Image (tube, rainbow, N blue to C red):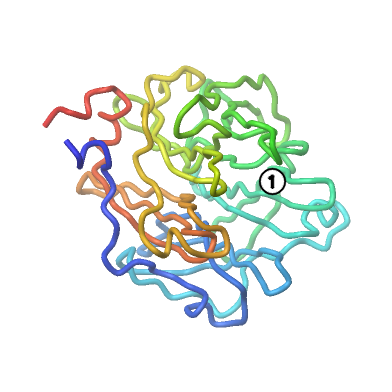
Amino acid sequence: MMERIFPFQRYRQNPILTKSDVPYACNTVFNAAACRFKDQYLLILRIEDQAGKSHFTLARSGDGRNFKIDPQPWVTPDTDPRWEPYERYGIEDPRVTRIGDEYFITYTAFGPFGPRVAIGKTSDFVGFERVSLATEVDNKDAVLFPERIRGDYVMLDRPSGVGRRGGSIWITYSPDLVHWGRARAILAPEPGWSNSRLGICTPPIRTHEGWLTLYHGVRETAGGKLYRMGVLLLDLHDPAKIVGYSPYFIFGPEEIYERVGDVPNVIFACGLLPEDDGTVKMYYGAADTCIALAEARLEDLVRICLGVSHLG
């Protein structure tokens, strides 16, 4: 029963990346997007420099556990006048979705007007092309679905939720990744483990029962904010419809590297990769200070959403 309620098992050699692994000076590394590219696992790392601004650097692995970080940043805040005011304070928390032969990266563009969702793309992880600023402020925690649905690109995001305002998970649609609309809220904070705000963590994975994604919930406590994780299943044909979701958190900060850091008591996933053996690898930031890995069975995550997690 316990392994069904808490399906993820931490990698014994966590954390897998810390700032000591970064081949240049920085403050910290965390919240990495993840994908498979050719014969490698790729992480798009959020690295915060010593001035407090974030950029993206790639890390590569043959086994999904042992990564080597590239010697130079991959994407830095843009100086082009079209983008600079909105990325002036950094680019943060990437997620990556493959659609066809291209990899689309959603990320938070942070500037003096607040956080916005931005979208970029690459086909080779050498070049990077900015596509759009997809939202106005305040918005973040965005992921793209890996295929068009009824002809539209589909995105989950989190408008508002900045400061003391609550934030819910929304869905929105676009014909071209630039113009977005028909937005509607699909899941709001509830009393309990996620009473403050919610946000999507990982790009959806197609299963027979629906689109599966992880989300984080924030609880305000006397000791500060506590970030934990749930799982959500959406209808394959109409992803605005919820098939089911976890009524409890399925993963939360327990280890010292999750409890102690720049922002304590935080686990924050940006990557979830399915494997051929039916498991998934979850890459997550811990305490905004390092990157860790945990694994689960995809079937167990689906069962939790369907309310049958007790079945063997």
Q: Measuring from the top left, give residue 73's x and y in whole percent.
A: 62, 72
SS category of the residue bearing label 1: strand
Instruction: Give the number of marks.
Output: 1
Q: Measuring from the top left, give residue 114's x and y in whole percent.
A: 78, 46
Q: Which residue is mark 1?
A: 118
Q: Is residue 249 above or below residue 175?
A: below
Q: Nearer the viewer, residue 223 or 261?
A: 223
Q: Measuring from the top left, give residue 86's x and y in whole percent.
A: 80, 51
Q: Residue furthest left?
A: 312
Q: Residue furthest front?
A: 222
Q: Measuring from the top left, give residue 183's x and y in whole percent.
A: 65, 22
Q: Residue at x 33, y 52 (%)?
A: 281
Left or right: 256 as drawn, with respect to 102: left
Left or right: 166 as drawn, with respect to 227: right
Q: Residue at x 62, y 76 (%)?
A: 26
Q: Residue at x 32, y 27 (%)?
A: 305
Q: Mark 1 is on which residue type?
A: Ala
The N terminus - image quarter: top left
Quarter of the rendering containing residue 263: bottom right
Quarter of the rendering containing residue 68: bottom left
Left or right: 238 as drawn, with respect to 91: left
Quarter of the rendering containing residue 56: bottom right
Q: Nearer the viewer, residue 194 or 146?
A: 194
The C terminus - image quarter: top left
Categorize mark 1 by other alpha carbons within 10 Å: few (<14), some (14-19), many (20+).
Answer: many
Left or right: 103 as drawn, with respect to 272: right
